Image (spheres, rainbow, N blue to C red):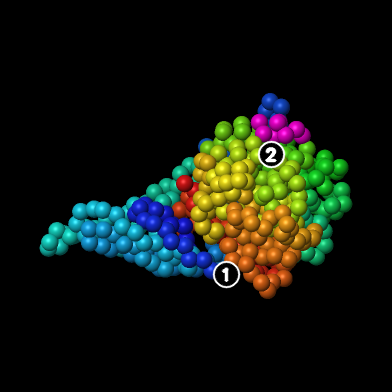
C-alpha cells in the first residue's frame, strides 16, 4: 500500500475499513551562536534557503522492505461515489459523497494536478480522466521544506561491538540508506577510537553518521563527540547547531532532527526549553525528536521513566516523530494524539500499518537492537496496553497488531523513507533484521 492511495481516498471523503494480516574530506568552520556552537560544512552545492544540499543523488535501488504497489483505485457512481481497489493488502476504501451527475474518475498513475479531459455524453453524465505527475513531480515543484525524494534514513541504538554490530552496519549499506542516526550507547567500553575504527571498517570514514549521547557514552563523551564532529565535517550540506549529540538541532537533505541528551546529560528543563525553541523555529515538512532514553509506557521492557512527558508532548504538538533506544528491543506505537495520558491510551488511534503525523499527532518507536543484546518483553508491565503497532523482543513478537508465534529475534535497524511515490507528504517505515527479515512495515502520512 502506498500512502498516495490513502491520500486519494481522503480527498474523496471516503470511509476507511481496515483488513489486518500477520504477519574526500571537506573543510568545515565553526561560528559562535549564543551559548551554542554551529558546525556547518562549506561544500554545499545548492542555493536552498534551508541550507541543505541535494547533491549526492537519489536512491533508486529496490527496497525489499516496501510493499508492492497495488492497483490504483477507480471511482464511479451515480449520484454517489464508490471507491474500490487493491491497496496492497493494507486496506480498502468504500464510501459515498453527494454530487450532481454521475462522475467517474479513472487514475492512470499517482495523484496529480495534470491536465484533465472532459466529455459530456448524452444524459448529462460526466467522465473525467486525470493523468500526469504527482505533487513534486514534473508538473509541480516540490515544496521548499520537503526532503530529498526517496530519502532513506536508518536508526539504531545500543550497539556494542563485534559481529552483530558489524552486521547491522552492513545491513545499512545493503539497504542503501543515505545516512544513519545512532540513538546512543555506542561500544559500552568508553573507547571512542575502537568504536570509530569498527564503524569505519564497514561504513568507511565518510558515510553520514549522526548520533545522540547514551548513558554508556558519558564517561568518554568528549572523545565520541570529537569523532562525530570529524564525520560531520565530511557531510556535504549537513548542519548542526548546538552541543552536538547532546542538545543539537540538525538538518540534512531536507530532514530536520533534534539530537537530545535528555535524561542522560543536562537538566530536564534545559532540554525541554531547547526542544520547544528549535521545533518552533523549524519549518521543515518532516522532523524527528531523537533520544537515547525513553519512558516505560513507550518501550516493551522494564526501563523507568527517564524522559519527561512535557518534552514528548512538545514533539507531538509539533508533529515530530519520536525515536528512542535504551531498551534492547524494537517497539512502535500507533498514531498518538494525547501522549502522556496512559488512561486514554496516549490518544492511540488509527490502524497499525498506517500512521499520521502533523500538529498534535505523532508516533514513537524504540530501535535498540543495534548489536549489544536482545531483551525480553515484560508482560507484567505491558500486557493490556492498546497503543502498540509492533513489538519485537526476545520472547514476544506482535506485528501490526497480530501476534507471531514462531520466530527467532535478531538485531537490526529501523528504516524511514521520506517523499515516496512522488508525494512529499508520504513516508514508509520498516524494521529489518540482519537475517533479512522484515519485522515491521508501515506507511506514514504527514497531514
> Residue 180 placed where, x, y %?
67, 53
Q: Residue at x 79, y 60 (%)?
A: 373
**Residue 32 appearing in the image:** no
> Residue 397 placed where, x, y %?
67, 65
Name the N-terminal-most of marks 1 and 2: 1
Q: What residue is disc 1 on? A: 22
Q: What residue is disc 2 on? A: 308
Task: Classify residue 443 as left or right of residue 292.
Answer: left
Q: Which residues are magenta?
A: 266-273
Name the residue nearer the viewer: 275 or 400: 400
Q: Residue at x 85, y 43 (%)?
A: 220
Name the residue nearer the viewer: 70 or 334: 334
Task: Classify residue 418 as left or right of residue 176.
Answer: left
Within 10 Å of disc 2 (Cα), the crowding (few <14, some 14-19, many 20+) is some
Q: Helix, strand, or loop for circle 1?
A: loop
> Residue 144 placed where, x, y %?
48, 42
Within 10 Å of disc 1 (Cα), the crowding (few <14, some 14-19, many 20+) is few
Q: Is residue 196 magenta?
A: no
Q: Residue at x 56, y 33 (%)?
A: 280
Q: Helix, strand, or loop for circle 2?
A: loop
Proximity of marks 1 and 2: CB atoms separated by less than 8 Å: no
Residue 189 shows which numbered tag?
A: none
**Residue 3 appearing in the image:** yes
Question: In this view, which residue lies farthest toward the top?
Answer: 34
| C-alpha gap between disc 1 and disc 2 | 34 Å
> Residue 230 placed where, x, y %?
75, 44
Question: In this view, which residue lies farthest toward the left?
Answer: 122
Amino acid at each position: 500500500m502506498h500512502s498516495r492511495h490513502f491520500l486519494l481516498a481522503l480527498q474523496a471523503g471516503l470511509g476507511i475499513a481496515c483488513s489486518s494480516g500477520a504477519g574526500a574530506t571537506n573543510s568545515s568552520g565553526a561560528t559562535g551562536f549564543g551559548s551554542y556552537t554551529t558546525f556547518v560544512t562549506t561544500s554545499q552545492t545548492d542555493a536552498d534557503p534551508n541550507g541543505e544540499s541535494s547533491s549526492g543523488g537519489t536512491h533508486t535501488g529496490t527496497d525489499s522492505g516496501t510493499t508492492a504497489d497495488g492497483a490504483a483505485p477507480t471511482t464511479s457512481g451515480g449520484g454517489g461515489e464508490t471507491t474500490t481497489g487493491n491497496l496492497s493488502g493494507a486496506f480498502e476504501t468504500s464510501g459515498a459523497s453527494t454530487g450532481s451527475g454521475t462522475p467517474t474518475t479513472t487514475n492512470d498513475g499517482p495523484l496529480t494536478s495534470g491536465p484533465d479531459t472532459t466529455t459530456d455524453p448524452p444524459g448529462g453524465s460526466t467522465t473525467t480522466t486525470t493523468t500526469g505527475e504527482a505533487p513534486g513531480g514534473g508538473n509541480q515543484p516540490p515544496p521548499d521544506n520537503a526532503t530529498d525524494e526517496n530519502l532513506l534514513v536508518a536508526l539504531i541504538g545500543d550497539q556494542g561491538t563485534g559481529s552483530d554490530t558489524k552486521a547491522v552496519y552492513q545491513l545499512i549499506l545493503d539497504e542503501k540508506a543515505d545516512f544513519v542516526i545512532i540513538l546512543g550507547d555506542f561500544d559500552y567500553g568508553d573507547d571512542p577510537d575502537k568504536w570509530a575504527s569498527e564503524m569505519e571498517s564497514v561504513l568507511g570514514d565518510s558515510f553520514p553518521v549522526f548520533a545522540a549521547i547514551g548513558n554508556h557514552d558519558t564517561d568518554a563523551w568528549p572523545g565520541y563527540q570529537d569523532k562525530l564532529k570529524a564525520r560531520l565535517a565530511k557531510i556535504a550540506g549537513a548542519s548542526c547547531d548546538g552541543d552536538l549529540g547532546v542538545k543539537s538541532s540538525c538538518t540534512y537533505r531536507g530532514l530536520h532532527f533534534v539530537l537530545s541528551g535528555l535524561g542522560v546529560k543536562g537538566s530536564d528543563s534545559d532540554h525541554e526549553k531547547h526542544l520547544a525553541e528549535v521545533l518552533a523555529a523549524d519549518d521543515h515538512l518532516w522532523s524527528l525528536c531523537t533520544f537515547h532514553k525513553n519512558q516505560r509506557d513507550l518501550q516493551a521492557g522494564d526501563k523507568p521513566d527517564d524522559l519527561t512527558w512535557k518534552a514528548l508532548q512538545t514533539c507531538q504538538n509539533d508533529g515530530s516523530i519520536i525515536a528512542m533506544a535504551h531498551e534492547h528491543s524494537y517497539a512502535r506505537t500507533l498514531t498518538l494524539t494525547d501522549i502522556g495520558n496512559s488512561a486514554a491510551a496516549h490518544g492511540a488511534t488509527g490502524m497499525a500499518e498506517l500512521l499520521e503525523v502533523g500538529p498534535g499527532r505523532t508516533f514513537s518507536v524504540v530501535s535498540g537492537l543495534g548489536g549489544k543484546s536482545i531483551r525480553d518483553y515484560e508482560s507484567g508491565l505491558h500486557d493490556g496496553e492498546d497503543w502498540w503497532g509492533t513489538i519485537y523482543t526476545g520472547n514476544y513478537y506482535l506485528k501490526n497488531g497480530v501476534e507471531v508465534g514462531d520466530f527467532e529475534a535478531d538485531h537490526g535497524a529501523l528504516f524511514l523513507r521520506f517523499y515516496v511515490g512522488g508525494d512529499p507528504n508520504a513516508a514508509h517505515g520498516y524494521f529489518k533484521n540482519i537475517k533479512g527479515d522484515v519485522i515491521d512495515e508501515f506507511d506514514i502520512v504527514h497531514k
